[in-house]
Amino acid sequence: MKILIDYQGRSIRLTEERLRHILERPEMVTLEAALEKTLQEPELVRRSRSDADAALYYRYYTGTAVGDKWLCVVVKFSSDDAFVLTAYLTDKPKQGDPL
């Protein structure tokens, strides 16, 4: 398990199981380091519209395996924990309240 630090200095767990899940997608294989950079230096952070306890961290990357895309790292927060749920590439950020 890795502990990543976000732009607000919060510790976020990235378990081996979640990392394997993320890296199963061929376009994500080369972006493991980008997960941490996206948490540390996001361009956008939004609250999920489907889960008020989840935050969507976005950073734009050029030249990924599928072209220029936003990387979204989804983090679930509770009162005493935070962990990465998933991460994926997308053409545009989802709607949600800015954080």
Image: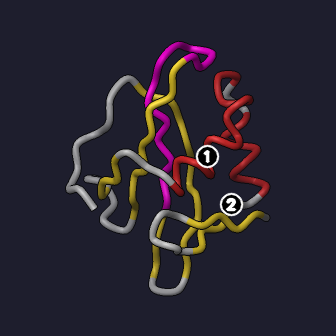
Residue 52 locus on image (x, y percent) = 30, 65
Residue with the mark numbered 2: 14
Residue beneath the point at 76% across and 44% down: 20
Give the residue furthest to the bottom.
80
Magenta residues span: 63-75
Identified by mark 2, the residue type is Leu
Q: Quadrant of the N terminus?
A: bottom right
Residue beneath the point at 20% across and 56% down: 97
Q: Quadrant of the C terminus?
A: bottom left
Q: Main secondary structure of the magenta part?
A: strand
Mark 1 residue element: helix
Identified by mark 1, the residue type is Leu
Mark 2 residue element: strand
Is 10 placed above or below 22 here? below
Residue with the mark numbered 1: 35
Residue beneath the point at 37% across and 45% down: 43
Which marked residue is nearer to the observer: mark 1 or mark 2?
1
Indicate left or right for 84 with 20 as reference: left
- Verify whether residue 66 appears in magenta: yes
Give the alpha-carbon distance from disc 1 to disc 2, as whole Å. 10 Å
Instruction: For label 1, count other residues whose C-alpha is less than 10 Å away and answer few (under 14), some (14-19) or many (20+).
Output: many
Label total for image: 2
Residue 33 locus on image (x, y percent) = 70, 43
